């Protein structure tokens, strides 16, 4: 055990008091962060708000159930709300405001639009509530306390690499491939992060001629999918196939998630064309089935149970007035501050490693039995 002499303890305690007083008088701008970091805790039955976006993928539907059960099991009063599909941003803003009014001590937010919550976060801060961004970073505010997510840039890198590897494995000996690119909704900060990660891998291969984006649509704003909606991806794929692939073979499609991957594959199938290599994300049950059937090529395992557990662990630490454990304090600049972050590692899943990747998942594991 590390016991320091009492005199040194007394001296360091004094220094801490002096530094604390100095910080109080001088460091106005960092007061909010310090208050969050050295919270004195709150009652164990406190209200915890969870504001999730509209259910554009299975993971958010699963997260809502897990938050409700997990927070209640720890004795908190959970207030879990989803933004509805229409009027989504103002509705989510209202939901967060009512959580603040209802005295929530922590508000966990999966943002619909991470650029439009500054007023709500400022109100939360004034009311003394701690705000945790869940899965999607919240931008342009100093009032965000923590971020908990899978490493989303890594998700993109894994998708880009899977697209390349899948096409090579399917077409041994070929040296060039025709591809198309899809990204998520432009209002979700993650969309550009996934796309940026994938392009780190793909851009050099486009530049050296290995990959040919036949439509020429390579800029983020040309390839986004408004609202993460399947029908938007499907109709863009329909247009691409009709416009560029009547006499050319499509070898691969970068898809940012499983919902869009299945829409893209649906479009290809309706057009009567052979399936290209298509990536995905989220490990949605229908996509895992498709991967096992040899149709969709890959997905990403971002186990929602682990992400929700880390968010609840942060709530517990705050409740007990403990320091919140984070593992990244340098990567996530939201435009106003570096946000203390807890990141989890995503895992690429193909037919080859699906059984092993989902071995602890009672819903997905049975789908991988061949
Ligand atoms: C999440 C993805 C999800 C997408 C659409 C993203 O922010 O990280 O897992 O597929 O939103 O809901």
Image (spheres, helix red, strand yellow):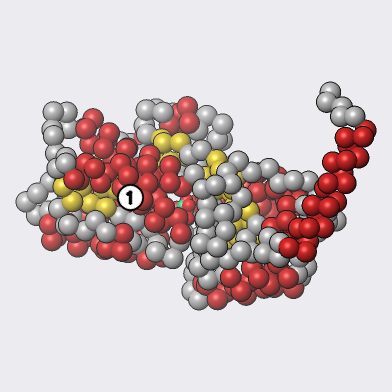
Q: Answer left or right for 207 relative to 151.
A: left
Q: Position of residue 152 (x, y in %)?
A: 46, 47
92 vs 73: above or below? below
Can you identify the residue that label 1 sits on? 255
Q: Where is residue 260 in the image (x, y as percent from the top left)?
A: 35, 54
Viewer can see residue 275: no
Task: Specify whether tag 1 is near ligand 1 (CB below 8 Å).
Answer: no
Q: Report the residue at 24% width, 56% height from top.
A: 218
- The image quadrant that residue 4 belongs to is top right
In-front residue for pair 149/232: 149
Q: Position of residue 297 (x, y in %)?
A: 32, 39
Identify the residue at the far right of this view.
Answer: 6
- The image quadrant that residue 240 belongs to is bottom left
Q: Report the residue at 50% width, 68% height from top.
A: 115
Q: Report the residue at 82% width, 47% height from top.
A: 16
Identify the residue at the far top of this view.
Answer: 1
281 vs 368: above or below? below
Q: Quadrant of the N terminus?
A: top right
Q: Report the residue at 83% width, 52% height from top.
A: 18
Q: Answer left or right for 193 relative to 222.
A: right
Q: Position of residue 266 (x, y in %)?
A: 28, 53
7 vs 316: above or below? above
- The image quadrant that residue 93 belongs to is bottom right
In-front residue for pair 126/239: 126
In-front residue for pair 93/2: 2
Q: Quadrant of the C terminus?
A: top left
Viewer can see residue 336: yes
Q: Answer left or right for 362 relative to 201.
A: right
Q: Answer left or right for 240 relative to 355.
A: left
């Amino acid at each position: 055990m590390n016991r320091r002499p009492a005199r040194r303890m007394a001296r360091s305690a004094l220094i801490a008091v002096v530094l604390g007083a100095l910080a109080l008088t001088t460091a106005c701008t960092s007061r909010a962060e310090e208050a969050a970091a050295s919270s004195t805790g709150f009652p164990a039955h406190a209200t915890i708000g969870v504001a999730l976006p509209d259910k554009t993928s299975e993971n958010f539907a699963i997260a809502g159930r897990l938050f409700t059960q997990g927070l209640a099991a720890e004795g908190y009063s959970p207030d879990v709300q989803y933004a509805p599909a229409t009027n989504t941003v103002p509705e989510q803003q209202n939901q967060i405001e009512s959580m603040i009014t209802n005295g929530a001590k922590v508000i966990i937010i999966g943002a619909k639009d991470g650029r439009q919550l500054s007023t709500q976060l400022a109100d939360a801060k004034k009311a003394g509530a701690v705000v945790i961004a869940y899965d999607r970073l919240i931008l342009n505010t100093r009032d965000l306390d923590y971020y908990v997510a899978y490493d989303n840039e890594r998700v993109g890198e894994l998708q880009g690499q899977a697209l390349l590897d899948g096409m090579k494995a399917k077409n041994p000996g070929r040296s060039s491939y025709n591809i198309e690119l899809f990204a998520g909704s432009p209002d979700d900060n993650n969309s550009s992060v996934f796309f940026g990660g994938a392009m780190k891998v793909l851009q050099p291969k486009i530049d050296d001629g290995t990959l040919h984006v036949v439509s020429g649509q390579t800029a983020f704003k040309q390839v986004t999918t408004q609202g993460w909606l399947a029908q938007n991806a499907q109709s863009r794929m329909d247009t691409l196939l009709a416009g560029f692939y009547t006499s050319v073979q499509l070898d691969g499609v970068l898809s940012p998630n499983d919902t869009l991957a299945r829409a893209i594959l649906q479009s290809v199938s309706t057009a009567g064309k052979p399936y290209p290599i298509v990536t995905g994300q989220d490990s949605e049950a229908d996509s895992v089935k498709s991967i096992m059937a040899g149709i969709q090529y890959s997905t990403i395992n971002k186990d929602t149970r682990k992400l929700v557990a880390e968010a609840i662990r942060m709530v517990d630490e705050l409740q007990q007035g403990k320091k919140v454990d984070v593992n990244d304090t340098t990567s996530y600049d939201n435009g106003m501050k570096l946000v203390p972050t807890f990141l989890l590692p995503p895992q690429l899943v193909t037919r080859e490693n699906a059984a092993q990747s989902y071995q602890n998942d009672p819903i997905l594991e049975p789908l991988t039995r061949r």
